[in-house]
Image: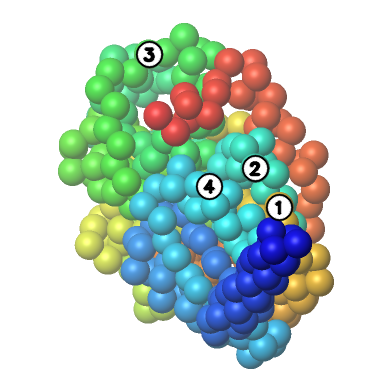
Amino acid sequence: MRKSMALTLFMVLLAVMSFQSVLAQGELGSEANPIQVFFVPSVEAQTITTGGEVMAQALKEATGLNFQVSVPTSYAATVEAMCAAPDASMGFIPAAGYVIANNRCGVEVAAAAVRRGWNVYWAAYIVRRDSPIYTYGDLAGKSWAYPDAGSTSGYIVPSVELKAAGIEPGERVEAGGHNQVVQAVYSGEADFGTTFYSPPTVPGAPWRIGDLAEPYDLTVDESRIGEDGNLYVGDLRILDARANIRETAPDVVDQVRILRLSAPIPNDTLSFGPSFPAELRQQIMDALYAFAETDAWDQSIGSEDFYGWSGLAPITDAGYDPVRLQFQILGLTEEDIFK
C-alpha cells in the first residue's frame, strides 16, 4: 500500500512539474516561447537580421504572435536548427536545403519564392572580364569560389553540372556567401565563382529563357549606380549577385562577366518544422501573403540586398523532385553536401 501511495504521489508530482514547465515556457508564439524564424546566410547577416525583424514585426501585428529571427552560421546549421525545433520553427531555405531537411526530419514546404514573375532561378558561372576563360571546359583545373556547400545555386547545381560534364575544378574556396563569391572573382582571388542569377529588367522586352545572360553591349562603359541606388547598364537593371557588391565595387559589371547559366532551379522555399501547428501555420501564411503586398516587404525579404523575393506562391513537395533526381543521378548524399 505504501509503495502504491508513494508511486501515486510521485506521478502526481511529475504531472505538476510538467504542467509548471509548460506554463513557464508559454504557448507557442508567446513572448516566452516565440516562433523560431531561420534564414540561410546567403547574403550579409546584418541585412538579413534587419529585414527579418521588419517581417517579424509585421507578422506580429497581423497575428499577435511573437517571432525570433535567427541567421545560423551555415546552410547545414539552418537545417539542424529547424530539425531541432520541429514544432516551433519556420525557415527560408533553398531547394537543396529543403530536400535535405525534408529527408532528415520531415520539414514541410509551404510556399516558394517568386521573383518578378519567375518561379525558378539559375546559377551563374562568373569570371573576370579579362579572364582567358571563354568556354565551359576552360574551368577544368581553375580555382572555384562558392558560397557554402549547402547553397543550391552556389554549389549543388554547379557541382552536378560540372561532374556531368567531366570538368574537375582546381582549388575550392568556400567564400561564405554570394557577395563574397563575387568579391573573390572581382579581386582575382578565384578564377571563377558560382552565384545566384536573376534576369535583368529589360525595358519593353522582358528577358526570356534562352536569352543571353548579359543581354547588352559592354563595349561601351555604361554600367552605373542609378539615383535609386541600384545597378544599371544603360537602362537595364542588374539583378544577379554582382549587384550585391555595387556599393563597394560600382564597376563590378565592367570587371566581372557571366560565362554561362545553369539549368533552371526551383525557387527557394518557406518551410515549416514537421510538427508545427497547422492552425498557426495558416495564420502565418495568410499574414505573409498580405505582407507581400505592402511597401514594407521591399524593406525585408523583397529587398535586392536581402533575398529579392517579389512575392511567394503555394507549392507542394513534388515541386522539388528535380533536385532529388539530381542527387540520385550523381549519388550525392547529405554528407557530400554538408561535409
Amino acid type at mark 1: Pro
Circle 1/circle 2 CB separation < 8 Å: yes
Amino acid type at mark 4: Val
Q: Secondary structure at mark 1?
A: loop
- Of badges 4 and 2, nearer the viewer stands 2
Residue ID for mark 1:
274
Question: Is 220 situated above or below 115?
Answer: above
Q: Secondary structure at mark 4?
A: helix
Left or right: residue 324 versus residue 145 is right
Towards the viewer: 304 or 208: 304
> What is the distance, in whole Å, between disc 3 and disc 1 at their CAs?
38 Å
Question: Is 281 situated above or below 169?
Answer: below
Question: Is 261 situated above or below 311?
Answer: above
- Residue 259 drawn at (x, y percent): 42, 32
Towards the viewer: 275 or 79: 275
Circle 4/circle 2 CB separation < 8 Å: no
Identify the mark nearer the N-term, 2 or 3.
Answer: 2
- Of badges 2 and 3, nearer the viewer stands 2
Amino acid type at mark 2: Cys
Amino acid type at mark 3: Glu
Residue ID for mark 3:
168
Residue ID for mark 2:
105
Identify the mark nearer the N-term, 4 or 3.
Answer: 4
